[in-house]
Amino acid sequence: MNSQKEQSARLGSEPIPALLKRLSIPAIAGMLAMSVYNLVDTIFISYAVGIDGVAAVTLAFPLMIVMMAVAGALGMGGASVISRRLGAGKEKEADHVFSNMMMLVVLIGVIGVIGSYTLLNPVLQLFGAGDTVMAMAYSYIFPITMGTVFFTFAFTTNAVIRAEGNARFAMITMIIPSVLNIILDPVFIIWLNMGVQGAAIATVISQASVTFMVLKYFISGKSSLHIRPVLMLPVWRIIKEVSIVGMPAFARQVAGSVMMIVINAMLIRYGGEFYVGVFGVVQRIAMITLMPMMGILQGMQPIVGYNFGARQFGRMSEAIKLSLKVVTLFSFLVFGAAMVIPDWLMRVFTQDQAVIDAGVDALRIIFAVAFVIGIQVISGGLYQALGKARPALILSMARQVLFLIPLVLILAPVIGVWGVWIAFPAADILAVLLSLYFLRRDRKLFFPPDAQAKKEENLQEKHA
């Protein structure tokens, strides 16, 4: 137990570059592993079922995003509260927060099962696809929603494990289901001839596989936190704090779901289901390229939250600046890949030349200003790590809701499918300008004068 407390305490003492590297690399590895299984899902579906199968999964994906939004809100909100409690030395309060989170995981799982039987068909019918694609979309999303409790538990506990500084175990809990999913995909999709439903079943089994391992981690005392049944009784004060802090994560994911519904509808209306499939492939590529930046953010958040709670503002500022530099480098690499090798990226998923040609155009337009997206990633997550719900919510909603959706609705009727693609870089430009405004406005919060003075003092001691 002492070693686990020391592990959390390292957030307030280990040199920032080494600490960010130690926390970010496992996060990046875990997220890339999850991206790879998404990629493999899409590849198997594309080759075994065809572009209609990819379109069906893309059509159903907004519902999966909503499920992930709930889990993300609970995980990110709870992780932020827990890391600040641990930074302030309030271990018992951190246990209380965590136990209430586990109660909510069970509740969300029950709601997911009820929703599987009552809401799926009516919701999918609103999306407007043809009967064939609609039937495949239902066969994909039904097993996913039935397994809501496993997804929620996995997302929530992963965020909490990172919040206490155990990035390595958090990585393991992401890699194991990803590898298992890759192994199970050909079994269910091809050998058992279950198509898109097989992909969903493989995903649920893979997420369920780590449940017992994670439970053992918390019950055996390997964690700084404990699940205490007596503390699982709902406490409104805790639920409210976790919900408020987690709301930006929820809003960001739900906004992504609404964005996909709108984009799918516009693509069906002005281009057909073919372009929904093309967008599904492009979206998978976008997810993979974003993972390194999201990993840096996940490495930064517990450092910022812990040191903010411990009032070590110099360390907090150093972590923010270093993270911004690293994600900006990654942003330029993503931009370069999309501009130079878009055809190669598309060929990973399909050999259909029509899909490749349409996807190359979409990639180059959508990623036209990708070199600025790192700033967006860090800014919203930064406010969330500090428990500043309002600016975090605004920045989380900005790209999809304030900018992208209106631009798609305006441009698509005028120039069709190209209008959908052009809306993405336009929204990115507006979103990064808003992010820069917030960062400049609150620069004294992130880079307080005493932090700069401490940095100068350290430099003078170093050169003395």
Image (cartoon, grey):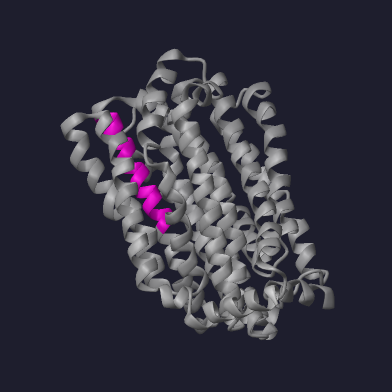
Q: Is residue 82 visible?
A: no
Q: Which residue is at a point 70% across and 27% down the rendered structure image?
A: 187
> Does residue 408 appear left or right of residue 354 in this picture?
left
- Residue 338 percent coordinates (x, y): 46, 32
**Residue nearest the viewer, comparing 23 with 141:** 23
- Residue 409 percent coordinates (x, y): 22, 42
Q: Residue furthest left?
A: 414
Q: Main secondary structure of the magenta part?
A: helix
Q: How many numbered callouts? A: 0
Instruction: Quadrant for residue 61, please give it.
Output: top left
**Residue nearest the viewer, comparing 107 with 406:** 406
Instruction: Quadrant for residue 137, please give it.
Output: top left
Q: Is residue 363 visible?
A: yes
In the rendered image, residue 422 lying in the magenta stretch gets the answer no
Q: Which residue is at a point 37% across and 60% down the rendered structure image?
A: 435
| Position above or below: 334 against 293 | above
Image: magenta residue range: 252-269
Q: Quadrant of the C terminus?
A: bottom right
> Does residue 270 appear left or right of residue 331 in this picture?
left
- Residue 185 percent coordinates (x, y): 66, 31
